[in-house]
Amino acid sequence: QVQLVESGGGLVQTGGSLRLSCAASGRTDSSTAMAWFRQARGREREFVAAANWIAGSSFYADSVRGRFAVSRDNAGNTLTLRMSFLKPEDTAVYYCASRVRSGNIYRPDSYDYWGQGTQVTVSS
C-alpha cells in the first residue's frame, strides 16, 4: 500500500504561482510513476502531469505545458508540481496519484493509489 498526502493548494490571482507537494509513504519502492490530475466542479478528472522514473520521462497536458513543471525527489517520497502563470481555468481540486503497473499514463484508471486532493483557486 502507498499513502499519498497533497499540500500547497490555495487562492492565487491570475498570473500567480503555486507549488503543490505530494508526500508518499508506505511501499513507495514499488511505484513506477506518479502523476497529478485535477477535477473542476462538474467536470471529469483530467490529467495534468506525470513523472515516470522508469523511463526517465515527464509528461504534460497541452493546457499546462510550459507553465507547470513536475519533479520527484531522489528518495522517491515527494512529488512536486510547480505551477506558474496560473489562469482561472486552472481552478480545480488537484490530486496526486501513484501506480505500480503499466498502462496509459494519461488515464486515471491506470493508477492504483490516490491522495485526498488539494484545492487550487485562481481568481480573475
Image: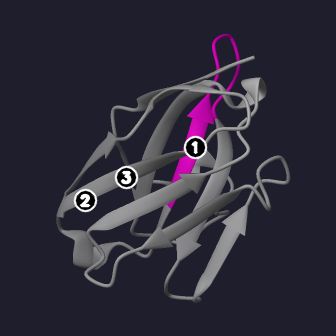
- Left or right: 61 with respect to 114? right
Q: Amino acid at mark 2?
A: Ala
Q: Amino acid at mark 3?
A: Ser
- Measuring from the top left, give residue 73's x and y in whole percent: 35, 77
Q: How far is the residue under mark 1 from the one under mark 2?
A: 16 Å
Query: According to the image, label 1 marks what residue?
Result: 37
Q: Residues within 10 Å of mark 1 (few under 14, many from 20)?
A: many
Q: Residues within 10 Å of mark 3 (few under 14, many from 20)?
A: many
- Residues at discs 2 and 3 in contact (Cβ within 8 Å): no
- Measuring from the top left, give residue 65's x and y in whole percent: 79, 59
Region in magenta: 35-45
Q: Secondary structure at mark 1?
A: strand
Q: Give the vertical position of 110 relative to 51 (above or below).
A: above
In the drawing, what numbered circle is on residue 21? Answer: 3
Task: Compare marks 1 and 2 and give the one earlier in the sequence.
Answer: 2
- Measuring from the top left, give residue 61's x and y in whole percent: 77, 54
Q: How far is the residue under mark 2 from the one under mark 3?
A: 10 Å
Q: Amino acid at mark 1?
A: Phe
Query: According to the image, label 2 marks what residue?
Result: 24
Whether residue 36 is in magenta: the answer is yes
Q: Secondary structure at mark 3?
A: strand
Q: Residue drawn at (44%, 60%), measured in percent from left and top?
A: 80
